[in-house]
Image (cartoon, helix red, strand yellow):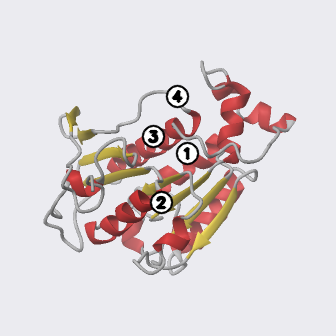
Amino acid sequence: MIGNNKNFAVELTEKELERYDRQLMIKGWGVEGQKKLKRSRVVVVGAGGLGSPTAIYLAVAGVGELILVDNDIVELNNLNRQILHWDQDIGLPKVKSAKEKLEKLNPNVKVKIVQEELTKDNVINIIKGAHVVVDALDNFKTRYILNEACVKLDIPLVHAGVYGFTGQLTTIVPKKGPCLKCIFPKPPMEKEKFPVVGVTPGIIGSMEALEAIKLITGIGVPLVGRLLLFDGEDFTVEVVKIERDENCPVCGEE
């Protein structure tokens, strides 16, 4: 799916071959798939409920460079779901807390942090050069900014959102399917503080990591043009087909 992560040669050490042994066994993955991951740069915007499991699973999979973007600090009421942050981290910037854990989890991964709020003014500089961007945000105002920048730079974007026991997931590949504005022409009603059980972003964030890995390795079929809807209360999963809007102000045909 991604062709621009072959710009430089990388080799795998003996320790890396052992570390990633189980995933190297996957059909279509092998050493070349692992090298694709090692060459890749993934930006995760949000280091909270969704960003924590996403970053953890990208790190253990062997993504070469992770860039974490968040301007918040760790608070006590984050700890039921934001698993990269522990009681001892309360008061610390989330990106610094996350970086410390991820580097211990896999020292082969470069973790860079951007302790800023994502805005129209800085978004291009932050995501430029990424192979995949992951939306681990909690509001559509910033998601729309991220979506527009990814379309402009032709960078795949993995989107997710959670509420209570429910979650949603889709993958946006510019020019190959609908963008976030096509799927959600108007932002849903949002609350500054909303209910969520910690395991929900754990499940959905893990799915985001899986989508990013699929995009990088070229294995499987990403959720392009499809919106996955998860309901943990009755454990149902529905996948809805979404068409691209030719009149979309962000990605529509000129």
- State the SS at label 3: helix
Label located before the other in sequence (3 or 4): 3
- State the SS at label 2: helix
Label located before the other in sequence (4 or 2): 2
Name the one closer to the observer, 127 or 237: 127
**In the rendering, at what x and y percent does residue 228 appear?**
27, 39
* Left or right: 136, with 252 as reference point: right
**In the rendering, at what x and y percent does residue 241 appear?**
21, 35
- State the SS at label 4: loop
Q: CA distance from mark 3 to mark 1?
A: 11 Å
Which residue is disc 1 drawn over?
Answer: 57
Which residue is disc 2 drawn over?
Answer: 153
Q: CA distance from mark 4 to mark 1?
A: 16 Å
Residue type, mark 1 in image: Tyr
Does residue 108 appear in the picture of this structure? yes
Badge nearest the viewer, 1 or 2: 2
Q: CA distance from mark 1 to mark 2?
A: 25 Å
Query: In this rendering, is residue 242 above or below 248?
Result: above
Which residue is disc 4 drawn over?
Answer: 219
Label located before the other in sequence (3 or 1): 1
Label 1 neighbour load within 10 Å: few <14, some 14-19, many 20+: some
Marks 3 & 1, CB-CB < 8 Å contact = no
Residue type, mark 2 in image: Leu
* Left or right: 138, with 15 as reference point: left
Dividing the picture into quarters, in which one does residue 237 lie? top left
Label located before the other in sequence (4 or 1): 1
Q: Find the residue positioned furthest to the right.
A: 14
Badge nearest the viewer, 3 or 1: 3
Query: In this rendering, is residue 238 above or below 201?
Result: above
